[in-house]
């Protein structure tokens, strides 16, 4: 039994961990939903290896934070990462690049600081979102399309012939992008056929269907990483 | 023999890798300094696992990018990471948090986008730098001080009783912060005695002395991650 600690109310970075746990059918408790967000700080207070921020996963006495590190740890246990060491590192490298994209997606609406409301930084957000739309999203999507194209075993999954946690994470950021920047994504999607096919493949992934239909799967919303503000998607 | 690919002219993220290689006395070539920055793109063009951005390390045919992933790979080989799997993951988790800090330090002078000059975003940078100085730096430094304090084997190094690559990386960001925000750091340093002692310990680390005296060690400058703009340190 795993315990996942992440803010309630948003999919956020916790969702990358949830998708892996759910795809593997692994039992876990979403602790903040059971005990409230205070459970996150209470955990940090009592361990010698407190995480800087959630998500945090506990597996018995073992505590680990940082989304990509959690997935690096869980991948082999859940059989959702490549078996050999070097492809496993490649999957991790992709996950770290997804993490970089997530920061940029968040900062497109919060360029001044997460401690201020969006309404306190709309002017700056409009400039940053333009850079994000015109320069950064194409650069990241070009890269994802390229690595799918260059997978020597075919473009079905990101690493090797089998699905790994990083496939679910790519799906999640494409979903997030399409939610937050629907106009942008509508204009770009045709240029990324491998990403589009990959997104549809994860959306139809059999082991995730019960989760997608459940209340455990949270919708994107304007408290999260991917937010839809029409003025930023102009 | 390792080949490191990173932009010439700035310490940047390449420096975290260099510090580990140099501390271990490992032989490596700094490829862009030999062949020019074009070597970075040429490498990405010819491999099936191109990195999104440098630094990239090659070890024979193996290619790996993302600073923290490179260090995760090198750590055991260079004997600069904990031997047991779980402390090794903890070191990696700290490195990922250092990577998060690096993004925020960079974005304090480039809040709108890396594709624009600082002079095109000074207004936004002043607001972001204030958030960085007042909220983010204290939060990160509180965390580093706390994890040093909570190391069950003593506060000499971050993980366990022996130095690991993450110690050199913490040193590098504290050096960077003191360079970019000297007024801020002068005001804060007394509150972080363990970080201060740790910084002095790495500065005096015997295996790094030849490197620190060499031309291979680049100074911080206003093309890099940590930039000194007095108006941002007001």
Image: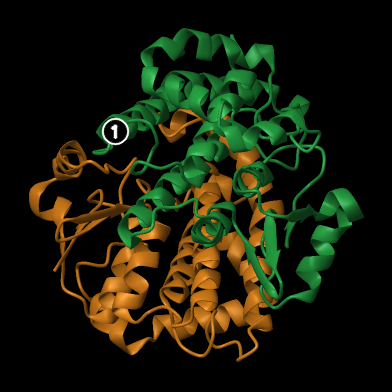
Chain colours: A orange, B green
Q: Residue furthest right?
A: B35
Of the 4 image quadrants, the one containing the N terminus of chain A is: bottom left
- The chain ID associated with circle 1 is B
> Picture coordinates of residue A198 (x, y %)?
52, 82
Q: Give the residue at x 65% y 38%.
A: A127
Q: Is residue A208 above or below residue B36?
A: below
Q: Residue furthest left?
A: A35
Q: Is residue A162 above or below residue B51?
A: below
Residue B142 sits in quarter: top left
Q: Is residue A127 above or below residue A198?
A: above
> Picture coordinates of residue B61 (x, y %)?
71, 75
Q: Viewed as shown, does residue A164 lie left or right of A112? A: left
**Label 1 packing within 10 angstroms: few (<14), some (14-19), many (20+):** few
According to the picture, the residue beneath numbered tag 1 turns out to be: B154
Say which element carries label 1.
Answer: loop
> Picture coordinates of residue A164 (x, y %)?
43, 79
Q: Give the residue at x 68% y 82%.
A: A150
Residue B8 sits in quarter: top right
Nearest the eye: A183 or A78: A78
* Residue A85 visible here: yes
Q: Give the residue at x 43% y 34%.
A: A114
Q: Viewed as shown, does residue B166 lie left or right of A45? A: right
> Picture coordinates of residue B93 (x, y %)?
40, 50
């Amino acid at each position: 039994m795993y315990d996942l600690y992440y803010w309630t109310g948003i999919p956020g970075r916790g969702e990358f961990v949830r998708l892996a746990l759910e795809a593997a059918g692994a039992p876990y408790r979403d602790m903040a939903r059971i005990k409230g967000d205070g459970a996150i700080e209470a955990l940090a207070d009592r361990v010698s290896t407190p995480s800087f921020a959630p998500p945090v996963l506990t597996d018995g006495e073992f505590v680990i934070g940082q989304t990509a590190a959690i997935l690096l740890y869980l991948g082999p246990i859940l059989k959702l990462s490549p078996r050999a060491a070097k492809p496993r590192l490649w999957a991790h490298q992709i996950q770290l690049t997804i993490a970089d994209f997530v920061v940029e997606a968040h900062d497109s609406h919060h360029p001044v600081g997460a401690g201020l409301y969006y309404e306190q930084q709309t002017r700056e957000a409009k400039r940053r979102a333009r850079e994000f739309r015109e320069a950064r999203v194409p650069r990241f999507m070009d890269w994802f399309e390229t690595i799918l194209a260059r997978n020597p075993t075919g473009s079905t999954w990101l690493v090797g012939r089998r699905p790994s946690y990083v496939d679910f994470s790519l799906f999640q950021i494409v979903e997030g992008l399409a939610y937050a920047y629907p106009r942008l994504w509508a204009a770009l999607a045709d240029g990324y056929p491998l990403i589009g096919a990959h997104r549809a493949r994860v959306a139809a992934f059999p082991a995730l269907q019960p989760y997608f239909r459940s209340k455990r799967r949270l919708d994107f919303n304007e408290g999260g990483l991917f937010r839809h503000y029409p003025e930023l998607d102009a």
